[in-house]
Amino acid sequence: MTNPEVAILMLSLFIVLVMLGFPVAFTLLAMGVGFGYYAYYEAGSIEVIADAFNNKIFYLLNQNTYSVMENDTLVAIPLFLFMGYVVERANIVNRLFEALQMAARNLPGSMAIAALITCAVFSTASGIVGAVVTLMGLLAFPAMARANYNKEFASGVICAGGTLGILIPPSIMLIVYAAIADLSPLRLYAAAVFPGFLLAGSYVVYVMIRVFINPSIAPKPRDEDIPSRSVVYMRLLTSFVPLTVLIMLVLGSILGGLATPAEAAAMGALGGLVLAAMYRSLDWEMLKQSVYLTAKATAMVCWLFVGSWTFASVFSYLGGHEIIKDFILGFDLAPWQFLILAQVIIFLLGWPLEWSEILIIFVPIFLPMLDTFGVNPYFFAMLVALNLQTSFLTPPMAMSAYYLKGVLGNKIELVQIFKGLLPYLGIVIFVMFLMYQFPGLALWLPDYLFGAYVP
C-alpha cells in the first residue's frame, strides 16, 4: 500500500512526540506497529478476532527483533560500554587529568588543555558522552574554578571535549552507523582517525589562541603549585600511559585487521578490568554497577534498533523514502549542493534531537541517494559523524550542557554554558569544510589499509 501522505504524517508525528519528551525507542516501536498495522492490513477473514491479528506487521516486528539479536557488529556495543564504565569507576581519569595538568603547565590555558586531552582519551575509552561530561564536570570544572578560570570558557571546554567519543574510534556511534548503512566498521574506524584527532587538535589550538589573546580567562598556575619534573613523569607513566596503551591496542588490533570490533572490544573490556585491578579499584560493588549500567544502555540501544528498523520498514513501504528522494532529486542538484543540503538538514535536526535519533531515522533517507550523486559512502559517513557533534552543542537541546548543569547545579547558569559552547560549533563546521576540501583526510587511511573502495 503506497501512501506517501500517511508516511509524511508518520514522520511528522514522530518528531512531535519526541520533542514532547516521549522515549525515542518505544515511540519508534509504537509508531511502526501502529502505522504498520494500517499499511499491511488485509480484510477478509470470517473471524473478526483472527482477522485482527492476521497482519504482517507482527511478523516484521518479530524478524527485526531477531535480526538485532543476531547482528555480529552490534556485539561490540556492550563490550565497549563495559570497558568505559569500568574505566570510569576505577578512578583512572582523576589521575590522568592531574598528570596532564602538570605536563601542560607551561602552555596557555594548561588546565583547559589537560581537560580536553583527558576528555578525548576517556571518551575514546568510554564512548558515553553523558558519563564523560558528568565526570569531567565534577573533576575538572571545580579545579578550573579554583584557578579563577572564566566559567563560560571552562564549561565550553568540558562540553565540547566530552562529545569527542562519538567520533574518535573506537566509537559506538560508528558501530551503529555501520549496522544502519551496511558498511564495514573497520573502514569507518580508519576513516574517522584523522578527522577525529583533527577536531580534538583544533579545540586545543583554539584554547591556546584564545588564552594567549585574553590571559585573564585562564590565569597561569602559581609557581608553588608546579611540581617537579620527576613527579610529572611519574604521574604520566602511572596514569596516561596505561590507559593510552589499552586504547591503542584495541584500536590498533581493529585497524590492523587482527581482530573484529567485537573481539577488540572484548579485549578492551578485559584490559579495563586489569587496569582497575592495578589501581586497586576493582571490587564487587564496582563490577556490579558496571554490569548493570552496561545492560541498561545495551537494552536501550537494542530497542532503538528494533523500533527504528520497524519504523523505517513501514515508512519505506508507505512510500516515504521515495517521495523525499524524488523531492530532493527534483531540484537537479550538483553533488556538492546535495552534500550541503544533507548536512544542513542534519545540523538543524540536531537542535531538537539527539545523535541516535538523527542517525537511525533520518540518515537512512539520504543513503540511497549517494550512488545517484556519486558520493563515497565513507566520506559521507565522516561528514555526518562530524556534524553529529553539533547535536550535543546546539541549544535548546544541547544535551552536553544539561549534563554539565545537572552536576554543577547553581554554580553556573545554563545560558553561560550555552555561550561557552558556541565557538566549538564554529570549529566543527570549519573542520567539516576542511574535510570537504581535502577528502583524503577521511579516505586515505582506509584505502591504504584495506585497498581502494569499490562500490
Image (spheres, rainbow, N blue to C red):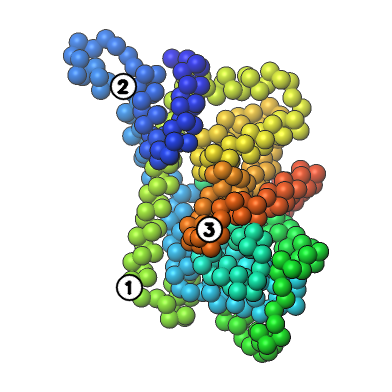
Pointer 2 local density, CA inside 10 Å: few below 14, some 14–19, many at least 20 = some
* Quadrant for the N terminus in the image: top left
- Asked whether residue 262 appears in the rendered view, the answer is no
Spot occupied by residue 439 in the image (x, y as percentages of width and height): 76, 45
SS assignment at label 1: helix
Q: Earlier in the sequence, mark 3 or mark 2?
A: 2
Left or right: where does residue 223 sit relative to residue 56? right
Query: Where is mark 3, residue-wise?
Result: 404
Spot occupied by residue 374 in the image (x, y as percentages of width and height): 72, 32
Please state which of residues 219 and 94 is positioned toward the viewer in this rendering.
Answer: 219
Cα separation, mark 2 vs mark 1, equals: 48 Å
Pointer 3 local density, CA inside 10 Å: few below 14, some 14–19, many at least 20 = many
Closer to us: mark 3 or mark 2? 3
* Quadrant for the C terminus in the image: top right
Task: Say which quarter of the image contains residue 196.
Answer: bottom right
Q: Earlier in the sequence, mark 1 or mark 3?
A: 1
Q: Residue at x 51, y 21 (%)?
A: 8
Q: Residue at x 80, y 67 (%)?
A: 212
Query: Where is mark 2, residue-wise?
Result: 55
- Asked whether residue 79 appears in the rendered view, the answer is yes
Q: What's the amino acid at mark 2?
A: Asn
Spot occupied by residue 26 in the image (x, y as percentages of width and height): 37, 38
Left or right: where does residue 127 sit relative to residue 227? left
SS assignment at label 2: loop
Q: Earlier in the sequence, mark 2 or mark 1?
A: 2
Cα separation, mark 3 vs mark 2, equals: 46 Å
Query: Where is mark 1, residue-wise?
Result: 284
